[in-house]
């Protein structure tokens, strides 16, 4: 335990982490613990959790009391588990929308779960991931190296590294970047698809969408997964387990801010966007053929989406 804590303090948190992502039971165990501590419903991860938890405890990823040591890593495990093994309808929709797309950028890519899901689905020419935080990019880089990818170049000052997967088809290129989402480091028309999952509401939405439009080629596809109007209640009721006057006031404040054109605090976990807000911004920034999707299992009261997806194309 002390050894793991020392690694975290020494900024070497991902030493030996590859074993978790290679072994399904360990990955599912971390995902289950994260979901359990966060109040998230997660099916299929309960099996063998006791033996997995014992091993995770021995390796120092879980405390003697059964609590997670590194919540950020556990969140990445949760995302990998879901997107690689327990895809929900909107996850499957993303892979369907990405069919035939060869040059893809994942905005706010986190630890890279979406990148690995894209590479697993079909061969790509180039997949790039960018995040403003260094820790998830370091995890992604560690996992790429664990998979045997060759490092072709790196620029530590820009947080950039280029990897090449070793396969018979000549290798797929994966670029990782630490940087500002509002000033993407690529030229115009660099990609035929851009993805932003569950992060748009934390950004300056207008600037972020403008940058995605800039780096897409004409006809390039945009896929957004967004916290919807049902998210504040889902977060507070299901995740926090709270039902009180304070909860109701909090949720109403979030709804009023969104419908009134205001914005909740940037780091608020209850922040969300409306369909109308996103579609109007897409239209204003030169996107067309806009499609809106929801998951019936991710609705509050059958009306308010916890998440929704929007796909669109850059008009030529």
Image (cartoon, rainbow, N blue to C red):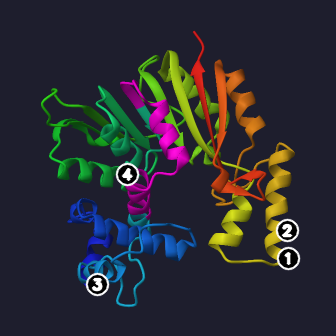
Q: Position of residue 205 (x, y in %)?
A: 65, 37
CB under 8 Å between callouts 3 and 1?
no
CB under 8 Å between callouts 2 and 3?
no
- Helix, strand or loop under label 4: helix
Task: Using residue 302 as the reference point, say whether residue 180 is left or right of it.
Answer: left
CB under 8 Å between callouts 1 and 2?
yes
* Range of residues picked out in magenta: 75-104
Q: Position of residue 71 (x, y in %)?
A: 44, 70
Which residue corresponds to mark 3?
54
Q: Position of residue 134 (x, y in %)?
A: 38, 52
Which residue corresponds to mark 2?
249
- Helix, strand or loop under label 2: helix
Task: Using residue 149 as the reference point, say whether residue 287 is left or right of it.
Answer: right
Label 4 Cα neighbours within 10 Å, binned few <14 / some 14-19 / many ≥20: some
Cα–Cα gap, marks 4 and 3? 24 Å
Magenta span includes 205: no
Which residue corresponds to mark 4?
84
Q: Between 190 and 9, which is closer to the camera in this rendering?
A: 190
Discs 3/1, front? 3
Which residue corresponds to mark 1?
245
């Amino acid at each position: 335990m002390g050894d793991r804590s020392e690694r975290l303090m020494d900024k070497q948190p991902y030493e030996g982490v590859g074993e978790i992502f290679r072994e399904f039971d360990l990955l599912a165990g971390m995902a289950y613990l994260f979901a359990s501590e966060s109040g998230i419903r997660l099916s299929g991860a309960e099996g063998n959790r006791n033996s997995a938890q014992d091993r995770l405890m021995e390796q120092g990823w879980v405390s003697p009391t059964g609590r997670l040591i590194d919540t950020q890593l556990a969140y990445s495990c949760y995302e990998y588990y879901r997107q690689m093994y327990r895809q929900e309808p909107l996850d499957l929709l993303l892979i369907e929308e990405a069919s035939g797309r060869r040059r893809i950028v994942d905005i706010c890519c986190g630890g890279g779960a979406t990148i690995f899901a894209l590479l697993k689905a079909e061969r790509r020419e180039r997949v790039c991931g960018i995040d403003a935080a260094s820790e998830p990019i370091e995890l992604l880089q560690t996992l790429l190296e664990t998979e045997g990818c060759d490092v072709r170049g790196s620029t530590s000052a820009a947080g950039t590294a280029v990897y090449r997967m070793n396969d018979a088809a000549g290798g797929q290129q994966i670029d990782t970047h630490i940087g500002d989402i509002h000033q993407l480091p690529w030229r115009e028309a660099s990609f035929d698809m851009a993805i932003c999952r569950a992060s748009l509401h934390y950004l300056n939405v207008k600037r972020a969408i403008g940058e995605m439009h800039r780096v897409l080629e004409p006809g390039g596809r945009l896929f957004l997964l967004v916290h919807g109007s049902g998210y504040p209640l889902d977060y507070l009721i299901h995740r926090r387990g709270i039902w009180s006057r304070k909860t109701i006031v909090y949720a109403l404040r979030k709804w009023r801010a969104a419908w009134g054109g205001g914005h909740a605090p940037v780091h608020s976990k209850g922040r969300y966007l409306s369909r109308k807000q996103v579609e109007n911004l897409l239209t204003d920034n030169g996107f067309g053929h806009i499609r809106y999707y929801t998951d019936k299992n991710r609705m509050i009261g059958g009306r308010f989406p916890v998440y929704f997806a929007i796909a669109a194309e850059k008009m030529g």
